[in-house]
Image (cartoon, helix red, strand yellow):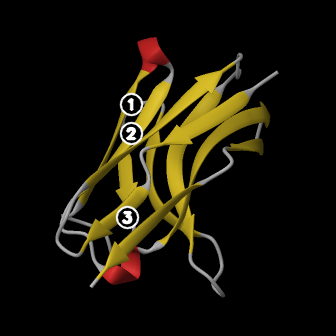
Amino acid sequence: QVQLVESGGGLVQAGGSLILSCVVSGSIPSIIATGWYRQAPGKQRELVATVTSDGRTNYADSVKGRFTISRDDAKKAVYLSMNSLKPEDTAVYYCNVKSLIITVRTYDYWGQGTQVTVSS
């Protein structure tokens, strides 16, 4: 059974840093991308950063230059390094793995989420 387990969230002051980790247990075939999404209270879940299987990264405009996504395939882990945090970064952060099922159909695996709170 596949599980995505996030860690590293917490309370930090504005301007501070955090590193989120996500470790995948179980086997996921045909991974095309891994990434981080977040959801703030009263808002929809939004993409933060993704990295494709061939190493291409994509970031939300709001985090470019501050956040860095990386992965360690040997450890089956993906990380999100967050610097210069702002109160508006406060949200529950979710790890995501996107798997190719058939041709253009994909399946999303999600972690349980980790809370990040940035105080002003």
Amino acid type of the residue that numbered disc 1 sits on in the rendered structure: Arg
* Amino acid at dot 3: Leu
Q: Quadrant of the N terminus?
A: top right
The quadrant the C terminus occupies is bottom left
Disc 2 to disc 1, how far (Cα)?
6 Å
The answer to whether the residues at label 2 and label 1 have Cβ atoms under 8 Å apart is yes
What residue would you read off at disc 2? 79
Residue bearing mark 1: 71
Residue 94: % across, % down: 58, 54
* Element on which disc 2 rests: strand
Distance (Cα) linking label 2 and label 3: 18 Å
**x 55%, y 41%: residue:** 6
Between circles 2 and 1, the one closer to the viewer is 2
Q: Residues within 10 Å of mark 2 (few under 14, many from 20)?
A: many
**Residue 11's disc number:** 3
| Residue 76 makes an appearance in the image | yes
| Residue type of the residue flagged with mark 2 | Tyr
- The answer to whether the residues at label 2 and label 3 have Cβ atoms under 8 Å apart is no
Q: Residue placed at 22% from the left, 57% from the top?
A: 17
Please determine whether, in this image, residue 112 is positioned above or below residue 54.
below
Q: Classify 103 as above or below 10.
A: above
